[in-house]
Image (cartoon, coloured by chain):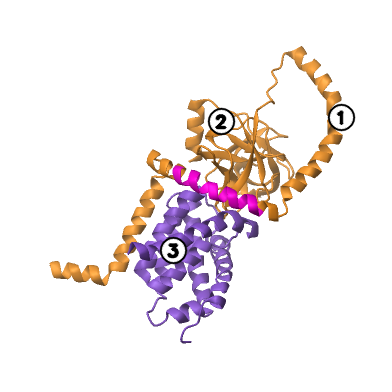
């Protein structure tokens, strides 16, 4: 069980460094892709909803404490969005989900939910309209995140497809 | 009953798990300012920032440093201005001594470099490469050559977390320089705004915003930005002022921390306001 979670946690460390050091350089007016969410979504689609929900919770906690942000915000948003990703999981659909462009759709939808939830929790002084929040803090980061899922679709070995 | 419960848990385990983990997340969110949570965060941050700093030093070799170019440009301007100011200095010192005015403009500056950024629309945070070993304390203001950048919110031995202007949790007491009107500057997730300024005040687009005399966290008269837009509320009695900051927060790389330790009691009151 622990070993099952060890691989994503080990992958989390370099990805978190990239997320905090390199991703800010490619952000467009504070809209940035979330590489940690891609990691969570990938493993959720491989291992299932329960696994993904727990993984989202653990990695969210780790990202919260190393990023200097609001502790609990990523934890909550990753847990919920990984749960939603889990709905796309199917034992017979693992390859279809990960190796096809459908992965980008999953990353876009669930990445948008993740960014939106994070914004709602962390923005304590919000007079911003719900539409603006959904667009700028949900859909646009979701799109950017989905774009970064492209290498997985291209380079992931396509077994039995 | 036991069988029913077992079946219930088995059928709805995903939902039970989700609710359980969500409740824990929200509880931790509510406990953010508790010492135990702070201690854990400080420990993790201090250790992980070492890796970030190493990677950042490699990355900074590869990327063109916008703020360095800005500093070079600024340097040339400053050289020209220096000569003019030397003349003014002599005159100023003479006048100051005449009215026995205490020179309040000299604060020690600690240069820092940003090693990582948390980029989201509502949580503008930097981690910088100096900490309590360099006498940095929570609540110290952070500036660069253009103006105010933010505030130190967490400190470890070698690293600190800076809450920048684009953080919805940061509220700053500000003054409109020209008409001396006070207000509170906040980030609403979209813009920096000063809310509820009476329309009877003659606020104009382009008016300079600076830190207020009333703030005990920030020294007075640190430039923040200019008024870029005025929006009246429904009744037309109050304005919301949109502020364009002088500092390009996204391009910032090298910052200074003003080594000011404010009055503990007032500071605590203001930090509570920020929370």
Magenta stretch, main secondary structure class: helix
Disc 1/disc 3 C-alpha distance (Å): 59 Å
* Nearer the camera: disc 1 or disc 2: 2
In the picture of the structure, the residue carrying the numbered disc 3 is A8
Tag of residue B83? 1
Q: Residues within 10 Å of mark 3 (few under 14, many from 20)?
A: some
Query: Which chain's colour is orange?
Result: B
Name the residue rendered at 48%, 66% in the picture. A39
Q: Which residues are magenta?
A: B43-59
When the figure is inspected, residue A28 is found, relative to residue A99, above or below; the finding is: above
* Nearer the camera: disc 2 or disc 3: 3
Callout 1 and callout 2 share a chain: yes
Name the residue rendered at 67%, 43% in the picture. B254
The hue used for chain A is purple
Numbered disc 1: secondary structure: helix
In the picture of the structure, the residue carrying the numbered disc 2 is B135
């Amino acid at each position: 069980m622990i070993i099952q979670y060890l691989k994503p946690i080990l992958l989390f460390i370099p990805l978190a460094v990239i997320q905090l050091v390199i991703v800010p350089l490619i952000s467009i007016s504070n809209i940035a892709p979330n590489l940690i969410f891609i990691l969570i979504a990938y493993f959720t689609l491989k291992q299932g909803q329960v696994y993904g929900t727990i993984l989202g919770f653990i990695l969210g906690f780790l990202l919260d404490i190393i990023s200097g942000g609001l502790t609990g915000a990523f934890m909550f948003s990753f847990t919920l969005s990984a749960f939603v990703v889990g709905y796309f999981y199917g034992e017979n659909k693992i390859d279809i989900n990960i190796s096809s462009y459908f992965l980008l759709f999953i990353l876009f939808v669930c990445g948008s939910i993740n960014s939106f939830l994070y914004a709602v929790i962390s923005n304590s002084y919000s007079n911003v309209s719900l539409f603006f929040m959904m667009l700028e803090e949900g859909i646009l980061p979701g799109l950017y995140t989905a774009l970064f899922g492209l290498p997985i679709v291209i380079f992931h070995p396509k077994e039995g497809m | 009953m036991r069988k029913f419960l077992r079946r219930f848990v088995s059928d709805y385990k995903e939902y039970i798990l989700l609710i359980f983990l969500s409740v824990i997340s929200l509880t931790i969110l509510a406990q953010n300012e508790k010492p135990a949570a702070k201690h854990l965060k400080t420990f993790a941050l201090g250790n992980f920032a070492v890796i970030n700093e190493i990677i950042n030093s490699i990355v900074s070799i590869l990327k063109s440093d916008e703020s360095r170019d800005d500093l070079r440009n600024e340097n040339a301007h400053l050289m020209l201005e220096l000569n003019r100011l030397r003349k003014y200095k002599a005159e100023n010192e003479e006048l100051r001594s005449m009215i026995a005015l205490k020179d309040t403009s000299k604060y020690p500056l600690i240069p820092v470099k940003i090693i990582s950024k948390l980029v989201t629309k509502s949580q503008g945070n930097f981690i910088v490469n100096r900490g309590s070993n360099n006498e940095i304390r929570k609540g110290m203001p952070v500036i660069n050559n253009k103006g105010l950048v933010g505030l130190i919110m967490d400190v470890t031995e070698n690293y600190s977390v800076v809450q920048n202007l684009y953080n919805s949790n940061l509220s700053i007491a500000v003054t409109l320089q020209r008409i001396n009107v006070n207000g509170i500057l906040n980030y609403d997730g979209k813009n920096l705004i000063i809310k509820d300024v009476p329309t009877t005040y003659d606020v104009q687009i382009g008016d300079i915003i600076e830190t207020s005399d009333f703030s005990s966290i920030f020294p007075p008269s640190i430039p923040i930005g200019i008024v870029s837009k005025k929006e009246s509320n429904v009744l037309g009695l109050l304005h919301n002022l949109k502020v364009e900051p002088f500092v390009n927060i996204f391009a910032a790389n090298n910052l200074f921390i003003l080594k000011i330790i404010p009055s503990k009691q007032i500071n605590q009151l203001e930090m509570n306001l920020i929370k």
